[in-house]
Image (tube, grey):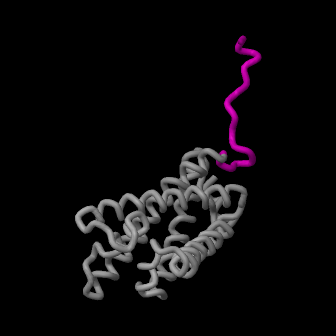
Amino acid sequence: MSESIRRPPRKSVVGRPRPGQYLLAGFVSGFLAGVALIALTSWYSSYHGSPELMPFRYVASLAQGPTGIPTHTLWIGMAVHSVLSALLGLVFAIFTSWIRSASLVALAGLVFGAAVYIVDFQILARVVTQFSAFRTVDQPFMASVHLVFGAVLAVLVLLGARRDAGLRPYYATETERRTEV
């Protein structure tokens, strides 16, 4: 193919990252938001006198059932939590890739975090045996930490997708945008 016919590389439309950039950002952001969530729950667990790795035992029960093998529980819990967090980040990125407003993506993150909490701790915990351990945890704390998960996820998806696309970050006001240029 001659040089004159070859198309230039495809760029983002109207300064938006391409869908693939959102997917990668969602996957990585989900993992990192999951790290924030598990760090908060581990801190909370140790603050209230339980082992700081207890949250991993709850998560491991998803794969092992309510009575897991104690020697492998920590590693299974880490693996399950990491994979689920990354996949949830991917789902979030798919659903928010069309939203053009950073504040709406942040709001969507809070709604997404609340939805994850409701599905996992209120619906599945009552219906599926593997989720039964989730009924024994502090529900208000878990609701709030899942809101934090959603907020962290939204911010990281926004920052990651725009950075991967080589775009400038979102600005709060038009004045900030004009002063940088």
| 36 is higher (above) or lower (below) than 47 | above
Answer with the quarter of the image where residue 56 lies. bottom left
Question: Across the whole image, how many numbered discs are drawn on residues?
Answer: 0
Q: Is residue 91 left or right of residue 3?
A: left
| 141 is higher (above) or lower (below) than 61 | below
Q: Report the residue at 68% width, 69% height from top.
A: 104
Screen quadrant of the N terminus: top right
Provide the residue span drawn in magenta: 1-18
Answer with the quarter of the image where residue 175 lies. bottom right
| 86 is higher (above) or lower (below) than 173 | above
Q: Report the residue at 41% width, 61% height from top.
A: 80
Q: Is residue 105 left or right of residue 37?
A: right
| 165 is higher (above) or lower (below) than 154 | above
Whole-percent x and y of residue 48? 29, 88
Q: Report the residue at 69% width, 34% height from top.
A: 10
Q: Main secondary structure of the magenta part?
A: loop
Answer with the quarter of the image where residue 65 lies. bottom left
Q: Is residue 58 left or right of residue 163?
A: left
Whole-percent x and y of residue 141? 45, 85
Q: Report the residue at 68% width, 50% height from top.
A: 16
